[in-house]
Image: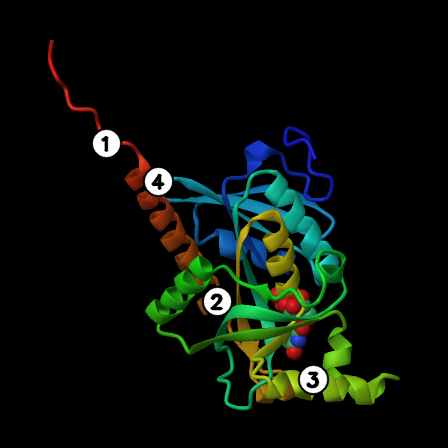
Amino acid sequence: MSTDKLAHHLHLRAGDVGRYALLPSNPDHVAAIAALLDGAEFVARNREFETWRGTVAGEPVVVTSTGVGGPSTALAVEELAALGVGTMLRVGVSGSMRSDTVNGELAVLTGAIRDEGTTRQYLPVEFPAIASIDVVLALRSAAARAGVPYRCGTAHTKDSYYGEMEPERMPLAAHLTERFETWRRGGAVCSEMETAAVFIVGAVLGVRAGSVVMMWSQEAMATGAAPSTDPLFATAVDAIRALVAADTRDTADAEPAARPVLGV
Ligand SMILES: O=P(O)(O)O[C@H]1O[C@H](CO)[C@@H](O)[C@H]1O
Ligand SMILES: O=c1cc[nH]c(=O)[nH]1
């Protein structure tokens, strides 16, 4: 893809983006996340992909919705990477797989189970879907600063929402239930639908990728008591601020020392 052209799905050009992107899947979350940046403005919308842009310490940061699931998320990661974005952070919602989760607790995702189809068209399933350590550490510190309940761990990324929520309805009921219990016994913390694509497509394209999700507790999933997304959005934007600050310091440190003036 030539970078001066309009990206086919996102309808963005290289000049629309900087080096950092926040990636909610839900288009309804984009403006609310962007409002936490400086000078937020709407940039473009096409299909499920809505983009707003703001700045952090003068550095442009875009917020782009990926839509639900691996295929549209892979499109967003591909097109943003081609336009020059090098750090991408999924900001999403998930269902807890643990009985001790507080409703609304955050999960800083260190890896994802690739129980979906998109990433198998990039790398064989033996290749792990893991986050960039820089992004994990920035998110963990941001969650601690926010003073909200959080944990770090592995997500289950799947293609079928109802296969997770109502497996008994599916012809593959026994298979789905057994696999879900297998992921749970392996320590997976939550189930969602995009993180594996962000990690695997990010890895293939050399993008620094991370993911933070808010978890519905198991009880809240049964009762429908919706948790707030405010701590999630604040933590994600705070992590991006920390990454921008660290990158700015690294760039300054890498600049050659000023030459001594020797006089004539
Ligand atoms: O609420 P978001 O962030 O979209 O995330 C979760 O909710 C959707 C399913 O309802 C999937 O996209 C899943 O990953
Ligand atoms: O359980 C859940 C909740 C939100 N999104 C999912 O994919 N699963």
Is residue 22 something that shows in the picture?
yes
How far is the residue under mark 4 from the one under mark 3? 44 Å
Q: Position of residue 127 (x, y in %)?
A: 65, 64
At label 1, counting other C-alpha atoms closer than 10 Å, the crowd grade (few under 14, some 14-19, many 20 or more) is few
How far is the residue under mark 2 from the one under mark 4? 29 Å
Q: Which residue is mark 1?
A: 257
User: Amino acid under label 4?
Assistant: Thr
Mark 1 residue CB less than 8 A from any atom of ligand 1: no
Mark 2 residue CB less than 8 A from any atom of ligand 1: no
- Farthest top residue in view: 264
Q: Earlier in the sequence, mark 1 or mark 2?
A: 2
At label 3, counting other C-alpha atoms closer than 10 Å, the crowd grade (few under 14, some 14-19, many 20 or more) is many
Q: Nearer the viewer, residue 125 or 79?
A: 125
Q: Earlier in the sequence, mark 4 or mark 3?
A: 3
Label pair 4/3, CB-CB below 8 angstroms:
no
At label 4, counting other C-alpha atoms closer than 10 Å, the crowd grade (few under 14, some 14-19, many 20 or more) is few
Look at discs 3 and 2 and give the one toward the viewer. Answer: 3
User: Amino acid under label 3?
Assistant: Phe
Q: Residue at x 73, y 39 (%)?
A: 8
Is residue 40 something that shows in the picture?
no
Label pair 4/1, CB-CB below 8 angstroms:
no
Callout 3 secondary element: helix
Q: Which residue is mark 2?
A: 232
Q: Which residue is mark 3?
A: 180
